[in-house]
Image (spheres, grey):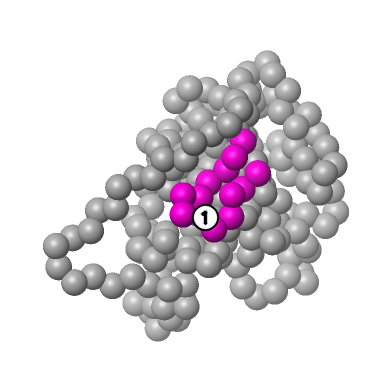
Amino acid sequence: MSVATVSAPPQIPPYPIWKFSVTDYHRLIDIGVLDENDRVELLEGWLVPKMSHGPLHDISVELTNERIRQALPSGWRLRVQSAITTGDSEPEPDLAIIRGDIRTAPRRHPLPTEIGLLIEVADTTLQSDRLRKSEIYGRAGILNYWIINLQDRQVECYSQPTGPIPTPGYSQCEIKQPGQQLSLELDGVVLATLDPAEFLP
């Protein structure tokens, strides 16, 4: 079905502010202003707090990791809660299928052209994952984006990214519920037929 992307209204404080580029963000990390204990990610130039995870979220990440890793062929790898880099953001999706061998991968975070599929597990973050993350990933041209929706117990499969248009996102979305067939596809090849129930606690 076709999906209309809705932008969340920007919340800008009434005093001078500073937006960070990806390069600025990396400098903050390099000089120690930010470290691994700072639970933030760069989203469209803003340093945004990362939400804490509940038990069901973490169980779903583990289930998904285990099931998808079994299906991946040589030449692809699965990253869990690790950063990717787009033109204006450095989000940390729950899971990402990345092209290439880890031993020969560049010493940087994966770029959109190297990403076959991003997955977010959503409970309290559902609206943000549907709106803001969808805009970021769609603008970057990431081909496939899934939301494992714990609230409604379904998987939302987004495809056909719009690229950098004024209101970016994805043109297509399929909703897959337990008992339905969900295809894991990379480079036009179906690697496995999955049941959304496999990802749900």
Q: In the figure, is residue 160 to the left or right of 86?
A: right
Taken as a whole, is the magenta stretch helix, strand or loop? loop
Q: Is residue 80 magenta?
A: no
Q: Which residues are magenta?
A: 160-172
Residue under the point 71% across and 36% down: 67
Rendering coords of residue 159 (x, y %): 65, 41
Q: Image quadrant of residue 171?
A: top right
Task: Work out whether residue 185 can be spotted.
Answer: yes
Q: In the figure, is residue 19 to the left or right of 90?
A: left
Residue under the point 41% across and 40% down: 6
Q: Is residue 170 magenta?
A: yes
Q: Is residue 36 above or below residue 125?
A: below
Furthest residue toward front: 166
Q: Is residue 38 above or below residue 168?
A: below
Q: Is residue 172 above or below residue 115?
A: above
Quadrant in the picture for the N terminus: top right
Residue under the point 70% across and 74% down: 106
Residue under the point 54% across and 34% down: 3
The type of residue carrying mark 1 is Ile
Rendering coords of residue 16 (x, y %): 18, 72
Crowd class of label 1 (few under 14; some 14 to 19; many from 20; radius 10 Å): few
Furthest residue toward left: 14
Rendering coords of residue 23 (x, y %): 47, 78
Rendering coords of residue 104 (x, y %): 77, 72
Residue corresponding to mark 1: 165
Quadrant in the picture for the C terminus: top right
